[in-house]
Image (tube, rainbow, N blue to C red):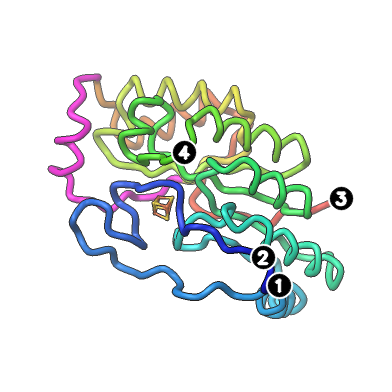
Amino acid sequence: EGGIPSMKACNAACIACISEDHCGTASPQNRLDFVPTVQEIVEVASEHLLKARDAIISFGQGCEGEPALNGKRLSQAIHRIRNLCSQGTINMNTNAGYCEGVKLMTDAGMDSMRVTIFSAIEENYIAYHCPQDYSLADVEYSIAYAREHGVKISLNLLTFPGFTDRMEEVEALVEFVRKNQVDMIQLRNLNIDPEFLMRIFPGKSPVLGISNFIKLLERELPGVRIGSYTHTVHRK
Ligand code: SF4
C-alpha cells in the first residue's frame, strides 16, 4: 500500500467549494490531511456494509477533494470489500472529470455514482467548476462508461433559484440528462452569496421558479427520479 501514490486533492476549483477556499472566503470544512490505507478503508466500509440496513458507503462525501484521483487506492479497497461482503451500496460522489479513476472504480464494482454539476452549459460549467485538466465531455465520457457497466447515475445538481431555473439552463439540463441517460437528479442547495454568484452569471433568460422547474423536469423526464439523496442500489 505504501507504493500507491496519492494524487493531488482535486482537479477543480469550484467557486463554492466547501472544503477549500478558491475565492477568498474561508471554506466551512477542511479536507482530510492524511490518506487512509486500503486496509483502513476496508475495515470501516465493510463493518458498515455488513451491519447497517440498506447500507451505503460513499467516497467523496462532503466533497473533501475528488475521490477518482485516488482511484487506484479506492478500487483496491472496493475489490477487498466485495471479497468480504456483497451487500450494501458502494457510491462515489465525484466531479467525474478524471475518467481513468472512474473506470478503475467502475471495474472494481462501484454500484452508484453521483456527479456534481452546476450547469449543463459548458461555458457556465467551466466558469463555476474551473476544471484544471478536463472538460464537460470528459464528465460525459465517465458517465457513459460507468452507466454501460451497470453503475446507477445521479446528478448532484447545485441548485440556485434564479440561475438553475433559467430557461436556457433548464433546456440544457434536460438535454444532458436525456443524452447521458441519468437515473436520478438530486437537487442540492448551493450555499453562496447571491450577489457574488449573480455578478459572475448575470443572465437575462426568463426564470421559471423552482416549483415550476421541478414540475417541468417531472414532465419532460418521466423515467428520471427527482430527489435529494442517493438511494440503495438493489443488485440482481
Ligand atoms: S470538485 Fe468538490 S472538492 Fe473539488 S473544488 Fe469542486 S467542490 Fe471542491
What distance separates the C-alpha of mark 4 from that of mark 3? Answer: 37 Å
Instruction: Name which of mark 4 and mark 1 comes first in the sequence.
Output: 1
Q: Secondary structure at mark 1?
A: loop
The residue carrying mark 1 is 1
| Residue that badge 2 annotates | 4
Q: Which residues are magenta?
A: 187-205
- The reply to whether callout 1 and callout 2 are in contact (CB within 8 Å) is yes
Residue at 24% from the left image edge and 19% from the top image edge: 205
Mark 2, secondary structure of its residue: loop
**Residue kind at label 2, given as amino acid type:** Ile
Which comes sooner in the sequence, label 4 or label 3?
A: 4
What residue do we see at 71% from left, 60% from top? 89
Q: Tag 4: residue type?
A: Asp
Few, some or many residues within 10 Å of mark 3 (<14, 14–19, 20+): few
Q: Are marks 1 and 3 in contact (CB under 8 Å)?
A: no
Considering only vertical position in the picture, is 74 above or below 48? Answer: above
Q: Residue at x 43, y 28 (%)?
A: 120
In the image, residue 125 lies at what x, y percent? 38, 33
> Looking at the picture, does residue 64 appear above or below residue 1?
above
Q: Nearer the viewer, residue 104 or 228?
A: 104
